Amino acid sequence: MNYQKTIKTTHIFTSKIQNIRKAHPTFNSLGTKPSPKSCSKHYFSCLHHKNASTMRWAAAGGGGLGVAAMTYVAVDYLRNVSPTWHQRLQPLLWSLLAFVAIMRVPFYRHWNAEFRAALPFLASIIFMLSALLFEALSVRFVTAVLGLDWHSDTPPLPDAGQWLLLALNEKLPEAVVEILRAHIIGLHHFLMLFIMLAFSVLFDSVKAPGLGLGARYMFTMAIGRLLRAITFVSTILPSARPWCAPARFSVPGHPHRWAQKYYVPYASDANAIRQVIQKDIAYAATGKYIGDYRPDWGSMSFLIDFLRPTPSEGSSWYNLLKKAGGGCNDLLYSGHMLVAVLTAMAWTEAYGGFSSALIWLLVMHSAQREVRERHHYSVDCVVAIYVGILLWKMTGFIWSGKDGTRDSRLTRLGKIQGRLLQAAKDSDMDEVRELLKDVEVGSQESKIKGPSKVMWLFACGTIFFSLTIVVLAFTWTSDG
């Protein structure tokens, strides 16, 4: 549809309506505020101004979500300042937020839209869980393939970001440095901030459906996790914390036979590297390979070469993946920063306002702390920021914060523009009113329908499922 042509035709039609109004003073054209007495006759114009005033009211009074978000961060930070007050206030805050959300459920008008978004939401959950499983497998592989001796003997990479932060510690006031060092926000905070954003559809603070927003968040997260796993598996980088792997993992000390053949002979000898480039074949004689422990995992035995289990770790491949955690290599790019950036992008698009700027400040604070505490190199955080931004921009087809009402109205108006012009020429006011009413009713159809019993069951199930996800996310990620 050519929207410019449609808008031009609409302007022509509006001018004709203005001429008709001179002969018919009781008719209110599109864009003119109708009187209360004429609302029953001029349906489209009344709803147009009603919707506009509602949007203005929501924009003016929508600061509650930002206040709730910052209150949550501040209360949770009390665990570092005053654990006693934290234990008192945190349950109270979460109980209050859950109670207010549940009380809004009977007044929520978009359950039809939520129902349509349920299937993409569930598909996104399955996709994200699959991506996390692949990532856990990749984390264990890059940790185990070179052996613990490599982790202990390989020094960290030079990082200019670390140097900069150390230099700033000498230049900045002590109070500023302490703020930069403070554990203000972590992974679970960003997850909770997004969950609060998604639940705010109950208060019309964010465009419905909330499940659509959640589906976009998890789908984008899954894509980001897959790209991350492919990236850090491609080139294995040493950790910024050399003591990490021996402290957390029980993998063999020697390299896997793949690394014994293709890496070890060419790791440090310049002549060997030159020859392998010229011959383009692994020519060095490695002798007898050092073998690994091989438990009986049945159909999953193909994972032994990737996970490299030891007798002390038990016989379950699943337990090995659960222990993978964040790994002990440098995992380019940062998964924590990906979560933070996606939360900030979602908040900026869906809600905006001053609170979005505060969340981006928290993202920057989290990034410098990742580098300062040597959980990641600077490059990991930089790449995570722009990858997260670009991925979020690319997944707008799942859910978008932009209001599609105007475009849908223009589309419908374009389909009936010929009939509108003819009715205007004929001064047929009844026909004009019916055509305009059809345009408006088409965009309001989902709101007019009342929730059925099935929809109420779906609403209760959705709220219960969502609150369960909140509890699980808070429990599983509270340690970062």
Image (cartoon, rainbow, N blue to C red):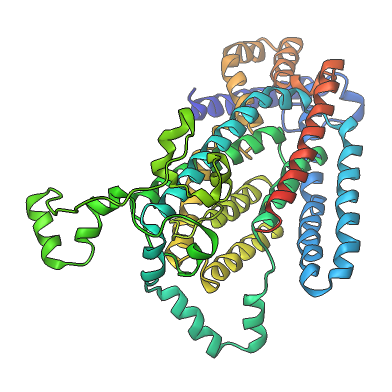
Residue 150 in the image: above or below residue 95: below
Residue 319 in the image: above or below residue 415: below
User: Viewed as shown, does residue 329 lie left or right of 262?
Assistant: right
Quarter-wise, where is residue 370 in the image? bottom right
Which of 445/420 is in front? 445
Q: Is residue 455 visible?
A: yes
- On the image, the x and y values in percent for residue 65 come to 78, 52
Residue sitting at x 55%, y 37%: 396
Residue sitting at x 19%, y 54%: 286
User: Viewed as shown, does residue 359 lie left or right of 102?
Assistant: left
- On the image, the x and y values in percent for residue 56 come to 78, 45
Residue 299 in the image: above or below residue 148: above
Which of 336/135 is in front? 135
Which of 233/154 is in front? 154
Quarter-wise, where is residue 9 in the image? top right
Query: What quarter of the picture does the C terminus occupy?
Result: bottom right
